[in-house]
Amino acid sequence: MSEASKFVKTEEAKVVEENLKDPLEIIKAAAEGIGLILNDPKPSCKHCHGRGYLGLRAGTGEPVPCNCIFPKYESQKPANDILPQNRAQRRAALKKMSNKQAAAFLKASK
């Protein structure tokens, strides 16, 4: 191996470097490629135990990401302030609320 080939990155060298990377780094690089910003793994996560990935797929060797590293968006959270317009749905939503929340909401809506 010549001195020049040690520093020139070939396709084989790139593949070897990817195999030696930490699985979390591979997940973050893939997420960055699609424009997704990931959180740091939670140290107390009961699924991944703070690693950020659950394991490696047997056939391909790619890491399986844990849910704790994905961001939680506001659209995924239920909106308690907006009640449905249908009477039956509105009553069902009010039953799910606590009595204090429902009373406060009904006072504010009058």
Image (tube, helix red, strand yellow):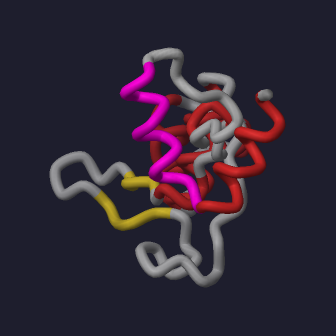
Q: Based on the picture, tell me whether residue 91 belongs to the magenta stretch.
A: yes
Residue 19 placement: quadrant: bottom left
> Please, what is the dominant secondary structure of the magenta stretch?
helix
Nearest the eye: 83 or 21: 83
- In the rendered picture of this protein, how many numbered marks are placed on residues? 0
* Residue 33 position in % (x across, y down): 63, 26
Say if 94 sits above or below 66 in the image: above
Say if 31 sits above or below 54 in the image: above
* Residue 22 position in % (x across, y down): 56, 62
Q: Based on the picture, tell me whether residue 3 belongs to the magenta stretch.
A: no
Q: Residue at x 24, y 46 (%)?
A: 60
Q: Residue at x 59, y 28 (%)?
A: 83
* Residue 26 position in % (x across, y down): 55, 48
* Residue 40 position in % (x across, y down): 71, 61
Q: Residue furthest right?
A: 108
Q: Residue furthest left?
A: 59
**Quadrant including the C terminus:** top right
Q: Residue furthest top?
A: 85
Nearest the eye: 73 or 109: 109
Q: Horizontal placement of 94 versus 108: left or right?
A: left
Q: Horizontal placement of 11 versus 73: left or right?
A: left
Residue extent of the magenta highlight: 87-98
Nearest the eye: 44 or 19: 44
Say if 50 sits above or below 82 in the image: below
Q: Residue at x 40, y 40 (%)?
A: 92
Q: Residue at x 70, y 61 (%)?
A: 100
Residue 105 placement: quadrant: top right
Nearest the eye: 85 or 33: 85
